Amino acid sequence: MEESSVHPGGGTSVVKRLQVLALERCDRDDGITSRLSGAPRIHVVRVVTILDALRRLETSAEIDAVVAYVDLDCTERIEKLQSGYPQVPIVVVAADGSDELVTRAMGHGAQDVVWEVDIDGALLRSVQYAVERVKATRSLREREERYALAVRGANDGLWDWHLDHDRIHFSERWKGMLGFAAIELDASSDAWFGRVHADDLEEMKRRLVEHLEGRQDGFEAEYRILHRDGDYRWMLARGLAVRNERGRAYRIAGSQT
């Protein structure tokens, strides 16, 4: 649901109202609904049973969050909601201030727990934070999926070298290019440089040092590297360093083609 707001300088912008599903304790209770209904840019949909809540979630794609009364005897309500609609954050309102209830609620998938005695000051803020956390998590997951798809499409092997500890993470594809399984090869620099052809190693290291010392914008080198079958394969490696505030490189990551 959207509403328009007028700016002092003229013009309007569309502001989305948060759709909150309020799962009350019983027909006579409006504790959650009454506290959220007066908040700006909040639209409350009131239900009193878990079945009603599930039906609402099934028929409406616009529900942004669920707020539900829960006690120790009905924490399974959260699990039913979360398992069916994991993309919708759940905020629990609890009369029982026990650690056990918090543990159960969070374990079943609740984003936050608000005590009933603090509901006036904390509920709206908790709902807003829960919605933003879920949005941020979803956005990060989508970016990671796009990156993973791009990497698979390029068919490159990836490497990530933490220089201070001399530990390199080699992707499964990087190892596969040399005939190794994902669990093979250790994380040392020797697992890489120890397999580079002797005639190519000095030039490769020179280019790497030039980049790490800031004399080249990026690292790029072609070399032969020993495959598991005993033959050498030509590879192209590219990478960029990450530097601290003093300009010293402490990490470098890139690809092998």
Image (cartoon, grey):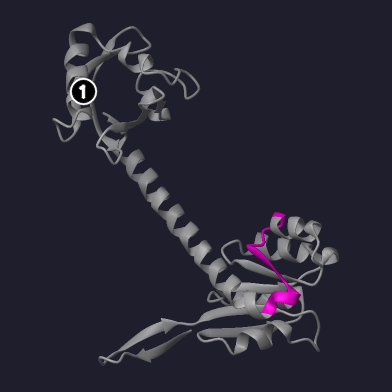
Q: What residue sits 37% from the left and 84% below the top?
A: 14
Q: Indicate yes or no whether the magenta region holds residue 108.
A: yes
Q: Is residue 202 left or right of residue 15?
A: left
Q: For mark 1, what is the residue?
A: 209
| Depth order, front residue of 231/115 | 115
Q: Is residue 121 left or right of residue 217?
A: right
Q: Indicate yes or no whether the magenta region holds residue 100.
A: no
Q: What residue sits 50% from the left and 22% below the top?
A: 183
Instruction: Tell me the quarter of the image containing the C terminus.
Output: top left
Where are the magenta residues, as a range? 107-119
Q: Provide residue 104's location: percent of width, then percent of height.
A: 76, 57
| Residue situated furthest front in the rendering | 246
Q: Is residue 51 visible?
A: no
Q: Quadrant for residue 188, please give it.
A: top left
Q: Provide residue 232's location: percent of width, then percent of height.
A: 27, 11
Q: Provide residue 213's location: percent of width, then percent of height.
A: 20, 28
Q: Quadrant for residue 223, please give it.
A: top left
Q: What residue sits 43% from the left and 18% below the top?
A: 180
Neighbour class for label 1 at 10 Å: few (<14), some, many (≥20)?
Answer: some
Q: Is residue 203 visible?
A: yes
Q: Is residue 28 left or right of residue 170?
A: right
Does 60 appear above or below 227? Answer: below
Does 242 appear above or below 223? Answer: below
What residue type is disc 1 on? Val
